[in-house]
Amino acid sequence: MTTQSADWQARQYTLFEEERTRPVRDLLNAAQAATARTAIDLGCGPGNSTETLLDYAPDARVTGVDNSRDMIDAAKKRLPHVDFALADISAWNAPGPYDLILANAALQWVPDHETLFPALVAKLAPGGRLAVQMPDNLDEPAHRLMREAAADGPWRDKLKGVERTARYRAEWYYEQLKPQCARVDVWRTTYHHPLDGGVDAIIEWFKGSALRPFLAKLDESEASAFLDRYRAGLTTAYTVLADGTVLLPFPRLFIVATR
């Protein structure tokens, strides 16, 4: 196994904090977060989304949950006055009710959305809002090449089934949520994140998220060879601009469901 922690590494994740935080600002604005008095940040990571939530709702009682000890420790250091708990979202059973349940780039890792989303809505107060943002980028070259590199190498058996492929369309989420909700807003936005450092910056970006489960299965030598193969694919798929910047297109699916 690699020397990387099996947890999400807070330091790696926050290398691109400004880019990763922009979508949650858009989500919280759409969710009218300023009106919330009780809120939970599911999959809070190192606390950047929680801090943004507090910027919008400074008087709210806010808590955060994540399944990574590394992330929770970073969040507590960042926001010592906020309550954070180590827990898996799929097993989280706090009854609520909440004015706002925020899940920013987290629920794509959690299975059984057909039961998860209705269960989250049930924890909302009347008029409360479930605010979700999930990457919708599995068709992007960065993800396609990740899967190809995993399937095309001596590590293929180790990496079989690691890739994240399950997802639903916007219509599916709307149909799941509408019977429980007074209003359901669903939209998709593609951000073009400027990354300094060419395709190596793309690798550093995904080391904090989608590459993590692949690298966690490999020893140091295998991980290096895997990344070399991945880098070669990225070099043909992405254009490095004259100043060394590469634009990383990143589609994201947003949902605000009001009970």
Image (cartoon, rainbow, N blue to C red):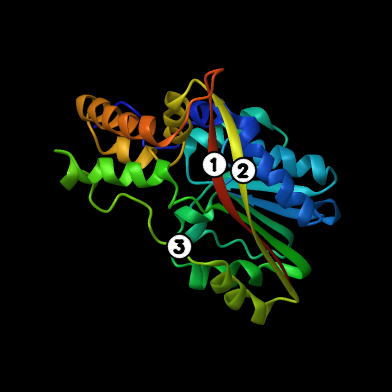
Q: 90 above or below 77?
A: below
Disc 2/disc 3 C-alpha distance (Å): 19 Å
Which of discs 2 and 3 lies nearer the camera? The answer is 2
Q: As drawn, which residue projects farthest toward the bottom?
A: 179
Q: Position of residue 231 (x, y in %)?
A: 34, 29
Q: Are marks 1 and 2 in contact (CB under 8 Å)?
A: yes
Q: Is residue 42 left or right of residue 147?
A: right
Q: Are marks 2 and 3 in contact (CB under 8 Å)?
A: no
Q: Which residue is mark 1?
A: 249
**Point 73% across, 44% down: residue:** 25
Q: Which mark is residue 167?
A: 3
Amino acid marked by disc 2: Tyr
Which of discs 1 and 3 lies nearer the camera? The answer is 1
SS for tag 2? strand
Q: Position of residue 34 (x, y in %)?
A: 84, 51
Q: Position of residue 252 (x, y in %)?
A: 58, 51
Q: Earlier in the sequence, mark 2 or mark 3?
A: 3
Locate residue 207: give its quadrant. Answer: top left
Amino acid marked by disc 3: Arg
SS for tag 3? loop
Asked if one can make out residue 227 in the rendered structure from this viewpoint, the answer is yes
Quadrant holding the N terminus:
top left
Quadrant holding the C terminus:
bottom right
Q: Which residue is mark 2?
A: 191
**Point 65% across, 36% down: residue:** 48
Q: Are marks 1 and 3 in contact (CB under 8 Å)?
A: no
Disc 1/disc 3 C-alpha distance (Å): 19 Å
Q: 195 above or below 162?
A: above
Q: Position of residue 215 (x, y in %)?
A: 31, 35
Q: Earlier in the sequence, mark 1 or mark 3?
A: 3
